[in-house]
Amino acid sequence: MTSWNRGYYSDSIYTCGYYREMAPIWLDLVALIQGHIPPREKEGDPFNYLELGCGMGFGLCLLAASYPEANFLGVDFNPSHIAHATKLAFRLGLSNILFLEADFLELKADPSALFINLKPNEGFQYVAAHGIISWVVDAVRDSLLSIASACLQPGGIFYCSYNTFPGWLSRTAFQKLYWLERGRSEKNSIKEPFQRTIDSLNALLGTESTPTPLGSNYPSLRNDLGWIDLNQPDYLCGEYANEGWGPNYVSDIHQSCLDHKLAFLGSATLPDCFEQLLAPSLQDTIFKESNPFIRQTLIDLATNKSFRRDLFVKGFNRLTRSEAEDRFSRLLVTPLEQMPTGPQARDDTQAEAESPFAFNTSFGQVLGDPEIYGPVAAEINAGPCTIEHLQTATGYSIIDLQLILALFLDCSWIAISRRDLAKNTFPVGQRCNKEIIQLLHSGRPYYYIILPDAGLGTQFSLIDSLIYRAYVEGLEGDIHSACVLMGLEELGVHLLDSDKQPINEPTIKLQRISSFTNAFLSQRLPMLVRLGAFPQKHLNPKGQR
């Protein structure tokens, strides 16, 4: 705790991530589902947004570009993070975002720097802290929660995500052994202690058929080790190399937040808001528990939860059921892809149909009845529509539609539209997307672009960007595929086969790229243009197609 980094790993920079659950439109939806008045009365209202531990600032820049009517402030103690974030905001031409290099312990003592651009007696409607409390020592965590509470306006929302027990229990063995290995390694040998830890634990687990006591008691550890990617050392160090590292039980985090006037509202992971999705065998034990700390702990234990995106409010501002249903019914939903509408046969030899509405949630797989889910999907496939329209068309209640739409949103089939307001943000979003793609081509790890209509970002890979660039330049057929392949190879990116081995045959490479291109141009590009990511004219570049 004597170093400026207060035990947090600071020898490298962190990754550039984006998390849709941090977007105001998403947070407001959870508030409505939970019967709390959202911090914004309506889309387009100005607001203030603070991210504590903003890292490289990429995600916050996407939010600032998506909501030009708002003011955004990102805080991080690492000057390398703030230098990158500030430069990125300038490159994207964003005037509604600032980044501050600051220490949480010092800000707790004097938070005035956070309010410098706010009006007198004004606070933040949203405060967010993604993952950070899992990586800092207790004093820093307490300071973070104190700052969040001090900055939030009454009724505001605090987004706080963190690693949880029991899902992270097996990985505590990995982190402990890694910490010991790191202590005896050369400072510049970043990958070596990770590799030695993986090798040692794999040897100690035994085989799947004859596991050792360690393998028997921690059966998930073998799978966890398989997910560790040594090609992402910055992420691994940011995750495991902190002095304050530690997953948490939900009850401990909820109590700490409550001590700072922050009361649990619900989860930004939408399916988690619907406890009726729990397996029937679990429901009796969980539903009869009225103590909120014990109830949430039981849920995490029953589902082996490893990560939470919890939302807290500084003072509840309750909606009546009628008010909540009225607000919800006026929301406009828009499709992100063509959804299934009925059962699909598994193959030609099996007459039994499999539901196309299979959703993977932290509660387990949820299977939706096509007779119930299909009509909702069909209405949305026809084009953007209000939830009130879905009520009329299907006869379903708001309660039923909340669950169905939450599952559709979670798997990125649909989004909530910002309506006509979004059209005013199209130029900002399109300008930023153009810059992001250029930076991606220069080697920057920016794998998201903005959907202005939805107020969200969406994944956009390097190959997506190369296909799009070649298309806009008017290239077609084999020339288009060859240009994309050349772009990948110039950046040292290899196409992989189903076994994750590099494809070496040029003909197969071009066939693979041609397949990617057809899918992108026929499915993704029309959606991206419709939601304002790219100009309408790019559906027909240079008069072709």
Image (tube, rainbow, N blue to C red):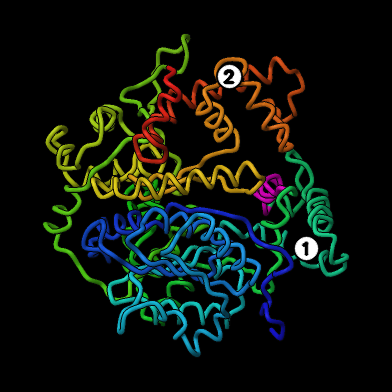
Q: Residues within 10 Å of mark 1 (few under 14, many from 20)?
A: some
Relative side of 70 to 223, left or right: left
Residue 367 visible within the image: no
Foreground pick, 252 / 61? 61
Question: Residue 284, located in which quarter of the rendered image?
Answer: bottom left
Q: Position of residue 503 (x, y in %)?
A: 73, 24
Query: What amino acid type is highlighted by mark number 1?
Result: Leu
Tell me which secondary structure the magenta stretch mostly adopts: helix
**For the residue labelled by badge 2, is the local secondary structure a helix, a strand or a loop?**
helix
Residue at 29% across / 45% down in the picture?
423
31 sits to left or right of 213: left
> Is residue 248 visible from the viewing direction of this image?
yes
Q: Upstream in the sequence, badge 2 or badge 1?
A: 1
Residue 219 highlighted magenta (yes or no):
yes
**Is the residue under label 1 in contact with that under label 2 (CB below 8 Å)?**
no
Residue at 14% of width from left, 63% of height from top? 320
Instruction: Indicate the amino acid at tag 2.
Output: Ser
**Residue 458: x percent and y percent?**
46, 43
Instruction: Please provide the residue range marked out in magenta.
Output: 217-229
Within-10-Å neighbours for mark 2: few <14, some 14–19, many 20+: many
81 and 9: which is toward the camera: 81
Q: CA distance from mark 2 to mark 1?
A: 46 Å
Image coordinates for residue 205, horizontal then vertical, percent: 77, 49
Instruction: For mark 1, give the secondary structure.
Output: helix
Query: According to the image, label 2 marks what residue?
Result: 514
Name the residue: 48% across, 60% down.
60
User: Where is 379 relative to 459, above or below?
Assistant: above
Q: Decide if residue 483 is on the left or right side of residue 123.
A: right
Q: Which mark is on residue 177?
A: 1
Q: Residue at x 27, y 41 (%)?
A: 333
